[in-house]
Image: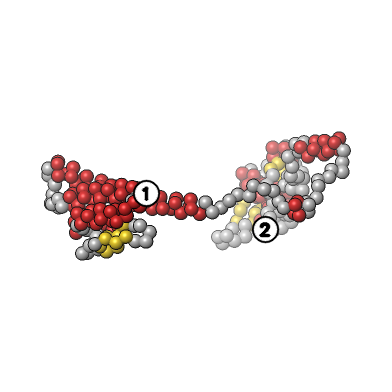
Amino acid sequence: MTEARADGRFTVRLTNFEGPFDLLLQLIGKHRLDVTEIALSQVTDEFIAHLRALGDELDLDQASEFLVVAATLLDLKAARLLPAADVEDEDDLELLEARDLLFARLLQYRAYKEAAAFLREREAGAALRYGRDAGPDPRFAEQVPEVLLGITPEQFAALATRVLTPKAPPTVSVSHLHAPAVSVAEQLVLVRDRLAAGGTVSFRSLTADCEHTLEVVARFLALLELYRQQRVSFDQVTPLGDLHVRWIGGPGSTPGSPGVADTPPAPRNRVRVDPEP
């Protein structure tokens, strides 16, 4: 039994299905309805009766669409009736591949149909929009003031020249940033004099008057140089405890005697280290 809906769409009524033909395709595509359970001959007869009922209002696009889908369903149904056992014959394997291709064609048809419906909807919506070809109403046009330039062409050219002239890249001044230069040789003389006068002094006392970390590092390097010259020795009672430096003297060890430590500091002896923040 076939019914013609108000919109002219084909509606199918079978033993196990009743509804629009598009819904039948969706159920088959989603595996919710087995194509082998559909009487395609009955569907074809109903569609022919539907076309006859339309008479002069026959839609050739709808008829062509049905023929393509019906042929695909018929081939798909024939392929589905093949046995599901292991396939050894190449001919049977080709039939199974053809079945998969037919099913893919059915899904492709549904995708094209949905895309066509979307484009049709967009076209119908765009048909209701019209661009404005005329200008603003006179009452609104009068509200826009005229552009008046209060400068001469020469002044305007000078202004454009000033604006369009490339500017020098901005520079960031670093004059306020500085790292004090500390001479290891100068700190060696200072440490040597204090050790020669005090005998044994802790490293904490030697660096108590340091203003920044750089001086502490320089005095520590000076102690290492004096230790290399065998003029001092180190004592540390406990791990990580206070380090005591003892003056043991040596050749040319008296304060003020000439030596490497008294040599004026050369530029390469000066190091720059950023102070602690």
Q: Quadrant of residue 174?
A: top right
Which residue matches tag 1? Answer: 112
Q: Are marks 1 and 2 in contact (CB under 8 Å)?
A: no
Q: Residue at x 85, y 36 (%)?
A: 153
Rendering coords of residue 114 (x, y %): 38, 53
Rendering coords of residue 25 (x, y %): 29, 56
Quadrant location, the N terminus = bottom left
Identify the element where label 2 is drawn: helix
Question: In the figure, is residue 238 to the left or right of 93?
Answer: right
The numbered disc on residue 204 is 2
Rendering coords of residue 168 (x, y %): 75, 38
Q: Residue at x 71, y 51 (%)?
A: 136
Q: Quadrant of residue 9?
A: bottom left
Question: In the figure, is residue 125 to the left or right of 276?
Answer: left
Amino acid tagged 2: Arg
Comparing labels 1 and 2, the label whose residue is closer to the camera: 1
Question: In the figure, is residue 128 to the left or right of 185?
Answer: left
Q: Nearer the viewer, residue 101 or 245?
A: 101
Please rate how many residues cluster around mark 1, counting C-alpha atoms within 10 Å: few if below 14, some from 14 to 19, many from 20.
few
Q: Residue at x 19, y 52 (%)?
A: 77
* Alpha carbons under labels 1 and 2: distance apart: 86 Å
Quadrant location, the C terminus = bottom right
Residue 12 to residue 193: above or below: below
Rendering coords of residue 55 (x, y %): 31, 53
Q: Residue at x 28, y 47 (%)?
A: 68
